Image (cartoon, rainbow, N blue to C red):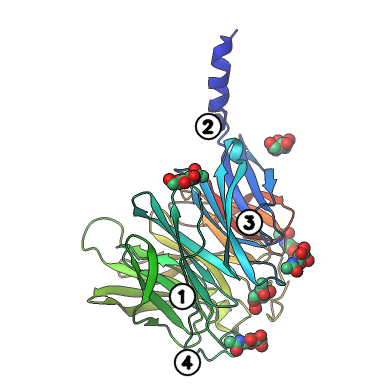
Amino acid sequence: MLAPNLTPFLFSLLPLLTNAATLFAAQSSGHLTTLSLTRHGKSYNLSATSTTREAGGNPSWLNIDTKQRLLYCLDRGQSNATKGSLNSFNIGSNGVLEKIASVDAPFSGVAAEYFDLGGGNRAYVTASYNQSAIAAFSFPSNGSLEPPAQVLHPTSATTGPIPSRQNGSFSHHVILDPSQKFILVPDLGADLIRIFTYHPDSVAPLTELTPLKTDPGAGPRHGVFWRTPGQGKEEWFLLFNGELSQKVYSYRITYIEGGLEWEKVGEVTALGELGEGLEPNQAPTSEIAVSPDRRFVIVSSRQHSFNLSPLHQKEDSDSLSTFRIQDDGALSLVQIAPSGGHLPRQFSLNRKGDRVAVGHQVNSTVVILERDVRSGKIGEKVAETVVSGPVVFVGWDE
Ligand SMILES: *[C@@H]1O[C@H](CO)[C@@H](O)[C@H](O)[C@H]1NC(C)=O
Ligand SMILES: *[C@@H]1O[C@H](CO)[C@@H](O)[C@H](O)[C@H]1NC(C)=O
Ligand SMILES: *[C@@H]1O[C@H](CO)[C@@H](O)[C@H](O)[C@H]1NC(C)=O
Ligand SMILES: *[C@@H]1O[C@H](CO)[C@@H](O)[C@H](O)[C@H]1NC(C)=O
Ligand SMILES: *[C@@H]1O[C@H](CO)[C@@H](O)[C@H](O)[C@H]1NC(C)=O
Ligand SMILES: *[C@@H]1O[C@H](CO)[C@@H](O)[C@H](O)[C@H]1NC(C)=O
């Protein structure tokens, strides 16, 4: 028989023995769900283990600080609201979320990024879509929150050529550059990637520099910095998806006095040949991510779930497209795989790169797909669970 005092120790090993992973799913229904993925031989079990409704009425984006065991949930506000909120949680045992604090945030927040400023201070910057806004928050890195120190409402004298989506400025993402000197915000309506510098101690004030101009009608949504794996010259690229052009772009970035410049290296249609025949709003792209080994970029498309698409509901799943990133930053199509449901707004790879978690808005599902790290190809759906409302973000606690 085991010594009784060994029992808690053995229980603490259980997650390792069963290959357990914890995930968090933000749902526009106001739920924020903790999920557990366990493996038993060849089969998997994905199930909700706890849920909180203390993350505002319309959770839209999560930032998971696994080191400090904190989770930030941006809430875009319900359609009848005039503001959203930012909510912080302590990640307790079994991934149970314990509310710490809440502050007002601009309405329609859809993405955010945080980074540490030093002196125990943290910067948190948000992008709002419908009433284009960019907010700069600063608060201690222990889960406490403060209201935004600055809220900008970007405007543009000229906007893109697609009236249904580009009749104003629509901020969609927040990207910290690798030198951590610049904050980039794609503007889907203005066909710009805006560039800001920030105050080193307080983040605010953000100061806008000359933006990067995309192709007209690109509708830049999300972006990610990339550089060639291995040694050699440190050359950076920005890969981003055009939600409206339904393309993926690669640009070489140059740091210049007073900002950034770029030069296009390539563009590919997210859905390959199939996508060539589709108009804006028929297969809008949503999320983009680079694999942990930096060899591949993955983009989600929603060709079967937008009712303006001729393919609307023709198949029971939308798509994840994988491209190999060449050493010169150019992209070549590897595979178009089913995402496992309709309206994959967002997805996340685990740290190893062998699993993709996809959140589906229409089906209210979190789907786990296997991924072959060597070929970059996405494989079977290994687990799926239906949660209580549309999933707009899913992230791994690792
Ligand atoms: C899956 O996990 C949940 C939560 O831990 C548990 O209640 C359920 O019985 C498990 N299902 C299977 C098939 O193992
Ligand atoms: C924001 O705009 C999107 C797309 O036009 C729309 O679906 C959504 O309902 C709007 N959200 C709010 C909170 O108004
Ligand atoms: C907005 O609508 C929700 C649900 O329909 C309701 O619970 C909430 O009280 C409303 N909020 C405001 C500010 O009217
Ligand atoms: C975080 O730190 C600040 C300042 O040091 C303190 O006032 C606050 O109570 C702390 N908050 C939490 C949640 O521990
Ligand atoms: C853009 O068009 C929408 C719907 O037609 C309208 O509600 C909105 O006010 C317009 N925005 C701007 C900035 O003109
Ligand atoms: C997702 O929901 C849509 C619409 O109800 C349905 O047509 C489709 O079959 C579902 N897909 C999956 C994988 O369940």
Q: Secondary structure at mark 3?
A: strand
Residue type of the residue flagged with mark 1: Pro
In the drawing, what numbered circle is on residue 52? Answer: none
Q: Secondary structure at mark 4?
A: loop
Q: Is residue 58 left or right of residue 140?
A: right
Residue type of the residue flagged with mark 2: Leu
* Residue at horizontal 58 percent and vertical 17 percent from the top: 7
In the drawing, what numbered circle is on residue 186? Answer: 1
Within 8 Å: ligand 2 and the Cβ of disc 3?
no
Query: Comparing marks 2 and 4, which lies closer to the viewer?
Result: 4
Q: Position of residue 73 (x, y in %)?
A: 57, 56
Instruction: Check contact, mark 2 vs mark 1: CB within 8 A.
Output: no
Say which residue label 3 marks: 26
Residue type of the residue flagged with mark 3: Ala
Which badge, 2 or 1, comes first in the chain's sequence? 2
Q: Is residue 226 above or below residue 285?
A: above
Q: CA distance from mark 2 to mark 4?
A: 54 Å
Say which residue label 4 marks: 158
What is the total number of numbered labels drawn onto the structure image?
4
